[in-house]
Amino acid sequence: MRDLRAIKTYQQKGSKKRSFIVATSIIIIICLNQLGLEWKDFIPNENGYKVIKRFALAALSPATDYQSTGIPDSAPPYYHKIIGSLWRTLQYATCAMSIAILIGITLGFFCSKSWWPPARHSRSLHILHRLIHRIARTIITFGRSIHELLWALLFITALGTSPFAAIMALAIPYGCTLAKVFSEIIDEQDTSNSQCLKAHGALSLSSWLFGMLPSAIPDLISYALYRYECAIRSAAILGFVGITTIGYHIKTSFDDRFYNELWTLLYSLLILLIIVEKISSYCRHKINTPLTIHKKTQKLDPTTTKRIDKIKYLNKQSNKKISLYIIATCLGILTIIAWNTGEPIFSKLSSEQRAINLERFLTKEITPQPVRESGNWLDSIPWAKKLLLDQGLYAAIQTLYIATSAIIIAFFLGLISIPLAAKSLNKEHYRGVALGLTKTKTYIRKASSLLTKAILMLTRSMPEYLLAFILLGILGPTAWPLILGLAIHNYGIIGRLGGEILDNADHNNAKITAAHGANTNQIYLFTLLPTVFNRLLLYFFYRWETCIREATVMGMLGISSLGFLIKDSRARDNADEMFFYILLGACLVMIGDILSDIVRTRLRTA
Amino acid sequence: MANLFQLINIHKTFGSTTALDKINIDVEQGEIIALIGPSGSGKTTLLKMLNAQHSPTSGEIKTSNTPISSLNQKQLRKTRSKIAFIPQDLGIVKNLKVFQNILLGKIGTHSTIAMLWKFLFPPKPELIKIHKILERTGIAEKLYSTTSTLSGGQQQRVAVARSLYQEAHTILADEPISSVDPARARSLIQLLIDISKESNLTLIMSIHNIELAKEFFPRLIGLKNGKLQFDSTSVTQEQIKQLYQLSDKQLAQ
C-alpha cells in the first residue's frame, strides 16, 4: 500500500513534464486554428515557387554592383552603399547602447533593493527608498513594453526622421531592459559577503558596493555585450520605418526584386553580427576564467630586500587580461567615432523647430480626436472603447496566438537540437566515460554537431522581423511567415542556451547512465533532460515574453495583428489611434511579463 | 581587569525556536576561547551577538562595560570595526584581488568614497603593510592574485590576514577549519593563536574538532540546545560525551 502511494507521488512528479508537453501541443493547435492557418498554406503557389527559385539562386551569386540599370555613372560605387549602411547600423547601435548603459546603471541601481539600509535605522528613509523604487520600476516596465520599432515610429512622428530618433528609439527600451536585468543580477548575488562587511562596521552602501557588486560584474558585462548584439539587429530593423540603416536597403532591394543585391546585404549583416558575437563570447570566456598561470619572464633578484621592490615585482608578474583592455579601448574609441561622424546627430532640425514639433505632437496629435474637439477627457472613453472592441482586442489576441505558436515550435525544435549543440555530448567519451563509438560514428556525430551549431548561429543572428519579411514574400500573406520568423530566431537562441545548460548541468548521474551503457541520445533523454527541464522551462517562458513583444510589431508587415493597426493608423495620419494601439500593445506585453514572471518564480522555487 | 565582553542572562529566539537560553559569559581581553557543541547548538548565534549582528531577545551584552543596545549607528560601526569576524564561508569576495579583499578589513572606518579610492588606487604604505601581513600568514606571493584562484586553505589565510589588517582587538571565527584537511586545520589554528598571543588579541572560535579544541584552547565553552553546558579551563571526557549525546530525534534532523 505504502509502496503504491510512493509510486504515485513519483508519477505525479514525473507527470509535470508530460502535462507540459500535452498542454503545449493542445495550445499550439488552438492557436493555429484560431489564426485560420492550415498546413497547406505552407505550399507556395506557382508564383511563390518562382520567387523561391530566384531567391535561392541569388544566394549563390550575391551582387557586387548595382542590379538596377538606371543608376547614373556619378553614383558612388556599390560597396560604398553597403559599407555606409552597415556603418550606420553599427553607429546607431553603438550610440544607443552608450546611452542605454547609462540609463541601465542609474535606473538599475534604483530598482535594486540590496543596497537599502535596514528599515529599522530610519523609517522615513525607508519609505523614500520604496517610493523611488516604485517609480523606477514603473518607468522601466513602461519603457520596455513598447518595442523599439514603435518608439521609432513615435519619435519619427514627433521629430521627423533623424539619427536622433533612431538612437533614442533604441536607447529607451534597451536602457530599461538593462536596468531590469542589472538589478535582478545584483539582487540575486549571495549576501554573505556583504553581511560579513557589515559585521566589520561597513555602511549599507559600502557593503553593497564592495560585497555584492564585484561578484555581479562579470554577469553584468556579459549581459551588456549580449544586448549590444541585439542592438545591432534592432538598428538594422529600424530601416523598415525609414531610417537608413541596412534594413532600409534590404527592404527596398526585396521590393524591387533585386535578390542578388539583397543577398549581398544579408551576408554583410550576418558577417557583422557573427563577428560581434564571436568577440563578445571571447570576452565572456575571458571574464569568467580567472588567471592562474603566472608568466615567469624574469626572476626576482635574490638580493632584493626592499619590500616595495618585491611588491612591484609581484604586480608585474600578475597576469593582466590585456586582451580585454584592448577590446574595451576599441569599444570606447568606436563609441566616440560613432557619436562624431556622419550626419550630425543632434542638429538636423534647429532645437527650436524640434521643440515646436514635439509640443504639437504631444499636445495635439496624440490627444484623442473627440477630446481635441470637445476639450473633455471623458469623451475619450467611448472613443477608446470603440477602438478596442472594433479591432484592438481581436488584433491583440491574434498577436498573442502568433507569439505563443512561435515559441512552442521553437522550443520543440530546440529540444531536438540541444544534444547536438552541447559540447559534452559530442565527444568520443562523455566526461571521461568512454562511449565505445567507432571512428566513423564519432566523425558523423562531430560533423552533425558542427552543422547544428552553424545553423543555430545563423538562425539566431537573423533578426526575426527580417526573417518574417522575407518569408512573407515567399509564402504569401498568412500568419505563417510571422510565426516562422519568430520561431526560427528563437530556435537559434534556445538551441544555444540549451546546449550551454547541458554542458553546465550536474553530470554525475549522467556519467553513471553512460557507464551503464547508454548512448548519447539516451543520456540526454533519460538523465540530462529531466535534470535541466526546469531551467529550460525558465527560458521557454522568458522567450515567450520576448516573442509577445516582437509579435506586437510583426503585423506592420501587413498581417492582421496589432502591428497592422498601428501601421494603418499611421498611414491615415491618426497619431492618436496609433498611440492608442501602441499602448494596447504595451499592455499586452506587460500582461505577458507578469504571467511569465509568476511562472518563472514558481519554477525557480520548485 | 575590565571585561571585554559581558553576556548577562542572554536569551534569543527566532520565531518559536530558542537559539540561546540564559547565557552568562565574561570574556577578558587576550583570552583564547573555543566554542564547542553539536550543530544547531547556538554557536554561530552567540558569535554573531558579540558584534551585534543579532540583538538578544532579552538580557544584555556589554562591550568594554558599555551595553551594545545603547550604541547609536555611528558608535556601533566603531565598535564593529574593532572586532574581526571570520564567517564559515570566509566572507571574501572571490573575484577581487587578494590585496583588495584585505583592504576591505578597514571598511568600518572609511566612508564609501574614501574606500573606493583606496580600493582602486592602493597607496604604497598600505600595500607594504598588507605585504607584511601576508608574509606573516604565509601567502605573500599572492598579493596581486585573484582570490578565486587560491586554494581553500590559502583563502582562509586571506580572511585571517584581513582580520590582522583591520587592527581589531578581537577575532571571532565561525568554524574556519571545517573545509580543510587535518594538517591544514592544525596549522591555521596555530597561526590564529600565535597571532592572537603576539598582539594580545582576544580569540573566540567555534570549532567541531574536540581534539584540536582541547589541545590548543585554554578555555572551552560548551553549548547544547542553546544552553551553557560548561565553561571551564579543564573539561572532562564525561562532559564532552554528554555534550555530543543526541536523542534519536535530533540525529534524524
Image: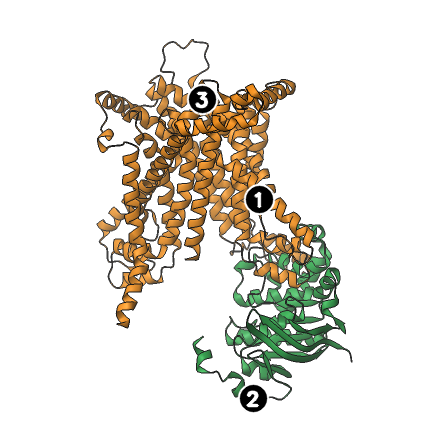
Q: Label 3 amino acid?
A: Ser
Q: Which mark is residue A108?
A: 1
Question: Which residue corresponds to the image point at 24% horizontal and 32% vertical from the top-left?
Answer: A38
Disc 1 marks a residue whose amino acid type is Gly
Please report, as a chain letter, where disc 1 is located: A
Spot occupied by residue B27 in the image (x, y as percentages of width and height): 70, 78
Q: Quadrant of the N terminus of chain A?
A: bottom left
Q: Position of residue A568 (x, y in %)?
A: 42, 21
> In 3D space, how far apart are the residues under numbered discs 3 and 2 (Cα atoms)?
86 Å
Q: Chain letter for orange, please.
A: A
Q: Are marks 1 and 3 in contact (CB under 8 Å)?
A: no
Q: Residue at x 59, y 60 (%)?
A: A193
Residue displayed at 50% across by 41% down: A225
How far apart are the alpha carbons under marks 1 and 2? 55 Å
Q: Is A353 displayed left or right of B4 in the figure?
A: left
- Residue carrying label 3: A569
Q: Which mark is residue B186?
A: none
Query: Contact (CB < 8 A) between labels 1 and 2?
Result: no
Query: Is the C terminus of chain A in the top left, top right, bottom left or bottom right quadrant?
Result: bottom left
- Say which residue label 2 marks: B239
Protein image colouring: by chain
Separation of residues labelled 1 and 3 (CA atoms): 35 Å
Given residues A109 and A4, the one toward you in this image is A4
Q: Colour of chain B?
A: green
> Alpha-carbon neighbours of circle 1 within 10 Å: few (<14), some, or many (≥20)?
many
Q: Is residue A572 above or below residue B45?
A: above
